[in-house]
Image (cartoon, rainbow, N blue to C red):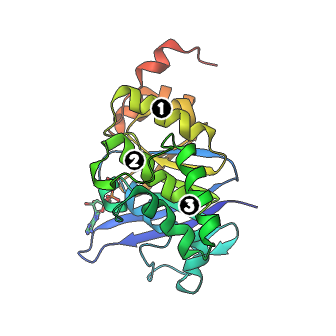
Amino acid sequence: MNALEITQLKYRYRDGTEALRGISFRVLPGECVALLGPNGSGKSTLLLHLNGLLPEKKSEAGAVKIFGEAVSSANLELVRRQVGLVFQDPDDQLFCPTVAEDVAFGPQQLGLSETETVARVKHCLAQVGLSGFEGRSTQHLSHGEKRRACLAGVLACDPRILVLDEPTSDLDPRGRREFKAMLRRLPATKIIATHDLELAVELCARTIVLDHGEIIADGRTGELLSDEKLMLAHGLERPHILHHLHPH
Ligand code: ADP
């Protein structure tokens, strides 16, 4: 069964902007897919659809299926349990005073007991390298730590699909390296919208390129990113890292 199946997904914002013009693709369980494209190409709009944040009224039902279940207002809750979305800006995601409260919020909503919740918070903070941060104020973390806390909060709901919007955009080189290593260790199916082409090469076997709300290319990351003509035509560039790699 596909983890994700998108069929002819279209979306138009209220002001008439056509953000998605008929997107179709499937993702198998365990795949890690990079979503590339210039600003305004539709990446964020697509990610929001993956957990039903933008109700898709105009297109026919069944445009987005998560593990075979069509996303609709009737099963939004079920879908959101399966899909964990890590926002681009951690400040949009963190809303509790302390790290522990923030990470505990999801498990509490799922109805876990206090003991289970505490154990899960501890486990997820350890997964992102924030052991012992339980009592820290979410507002006084470094940017990298905020990103990790967001990821811990999402992991705490145990999603089968992890969706990340620009996870490394404002991290320093060490922060980026550590965050990538952490993502690599997570077994969930991953969809990562990014401008960080090294991240795409290092983590994602497959890449989808979006432009003007359409899929321009979908294939093996190394091949697509080595295609200089394709990259330049869609506001991207061939990453330096590929210059050091053999073509095969
Ligand atoms: P990306 O994430 O690739 O930068 P977006 O999904 O944010 O692209 O945007 C896709 C298109 O939709 C762009 O033309 C953008 O200007 C437009 N858009 C995004 N959000 C809104 C909104 N809330 N209202 C109207 N247009 C929007």
The answer to which quarter of the image holds residue 160 is bottom right
Q: How crowded is mark 1: few (under 14 residues within 10 Å), some or many (20 or more)?
A: some
- Circles 3 and 2: CB distance less than 8 Å? no
Residue 94: x %, y % from top left? 36, 60
Ligand 1 picture quarter = bottom left
* Amino acid on which disc 2 is placed: Arg
Residue 196 placement (x, y as % from top left):
40, 35
Reading the image, the residue beneath label 1 is 178
- Mark 3 and mark 2 lie on one chain; the one further toward the N terminus is 3
Q: Give the residue displayed 54% in from the left and 75% down from the top.
A: 109
Q: Nearer the viewer, mark 3 or mark 2?
A: 2
Marks 2 and 1, how far apart at CA: 12 Å
Dot 1 and dot 3 residues touching (CB under 8 Å): no
Asked whether, in this view, residue 9 is left or right of residue 159, the answer is left
Q: In the rendered image, which quarter is residue 233 located in? A: top left
Q: Which residue is drawn at 43% across and 62% down?
A: 102
Image quadrant where one finds the C terminus: top right
Whether residue 7 is visible? yes
Label 2 close to label 1 by CB (< 8 Å): no
Which residue is identified by label 3? 24
Q: In this view, does 133 lie to the left or right of 156?
A: left
Label 3: which secondary element: strand
**Is 219 above or below relative to 55?**
above
Residue 147: numbered disc: 2
| Residue sticking out furthest to the right | 1
Residue type for callout 3: Ser
Q: Which residue is drawn at 55% across and 81% down?
A: 72
Circle 3: is it few (<14), some (14-19), or many (20+) Cα within 10 Å? some
On whether ligand 1 comes within 8 Å of the CB at mark 3, the answer is no
Q: Which of marks 1 and 3 is in front?
A: 1
- As displayed, is residue 205 above or below residue 153? above
